[in-house]
Amino acid sequence: MVWIGQGKGRAAIDRFFAEALSDYKRARIQTACCDMSQAYIGVIQAHCPGATLVMDRFHIVKALNEAVGEVRKEQWREAARDARKALKGRRWLLYRHSSTRTRRDLRNLKALDKHNRRIYRAWRLKEEFEHFWTYQATWVAERFLKQWAKSALLSRLEPLRKFVHTLRRHQDAVLAFIGTRLNNAIAEGLNRIVKIIKNQASGFRHLDAFSDMIYLTVGDLHLSGQIPARLRPL
């Protein structure tokens, strides 16, 4: 289903539930996945109180990467010129997933243990957190999450500590991923297509024109059924 509305706050999301979903459809929603925005969380809880809320994996990973990035920025600002040389070129390596790294990448990252222990510690915590997504049993994932959170709090890295507090606020929804494996990949893919539509047109002057192009591109439209048979191409 593709629905388009103006705005991005709570009021816009409320309109979606009012216009696109009947009471019957809302009652049948069993799980709902969203990012950590309170607007999304609040509206889902209001309109689908019986649904299990799942935090989107992509946004959790993004928040963790941002925390690691904050540690790197802090250390870069405080580092002397010689120390900065040792850190140069490692920015994107910190965010790269283990499955896409080369041996050379790994050697460069491990070298941080000598040049900057705080950045290295942040990276190691990020690496360890990847194990969370592999668990199949919720109770095992919960035990891991508690142990990881304890390590992150003891790291004395404030951005990581803030990330832990965020996880704890949404712990039930984070753990719900283990049992559902639900994520926003399809929605994020549609968002990417919408951005491409906008960029290709160099923007739209009116929302109606933009909406029409979105519906034509990704909407579930049966156009052939709307065209009289005598006008259809052979």
Image (cartoon, grey):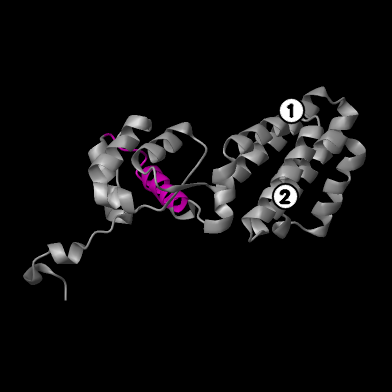
Does dot 1 land on a helix, a strand or a loop?
Answer: helix
> Within 10 angstroms of label 1, few (less than 14), some, or many (20 or more) residues?
some
| Callout count | 2
* 73 is higher (above) or lower (below) than 64: above
x and y, in percent, of residue 40 in the image: 43, 37
Residue 160 can be seen in this image: yes
Q: Quadrant of residue 207?
A: top left
Between 13 and 221, the one lying in front of the other is: 13
Q: Which mark is residue 97?
A: none
x and y, in percent, of residue 147 in the image: 76, 44
CB-based contact (under 8 Å), mark 2 and mark 1? no
Q: Which mark is residue 144?
A: 2
Residue type, numbered disc 2: Phe
Q: Is residue 28 left or right of residue 96?
A: left
Residue 88 can be seen in this image: no
Q: Which residue is mark 1?
A: 158
Residue at the (31%, 36%) spot, across then down: 14
Does dot 2 land on a helix, a strand or a loop?
Answer: helix
Q: Is residue 95 left or right of residue 156?
A: left
Camera-nearest label, 2 or 1: 2
Q: State the predominant SS element of the stretch in magenta.
A: helix
Q: Residue furthest right?
A: 114
Q: Is residue 87 left or right of residue 131?
A: right
Query: Is residue 194 one of those drawn in magenta?
Result: yes
Q: Is residue 1 left or right of residue 71?
A: left
Between 221 and 16, the one lying in front of the other is: 16
Q: Earlier in the sequence, mark 2 or mark 1?
A: 2
Residue type, numbered disc 1: Glu
The magenta segment is: 187-205
Q: Quadrant of residue 195?
A: top left
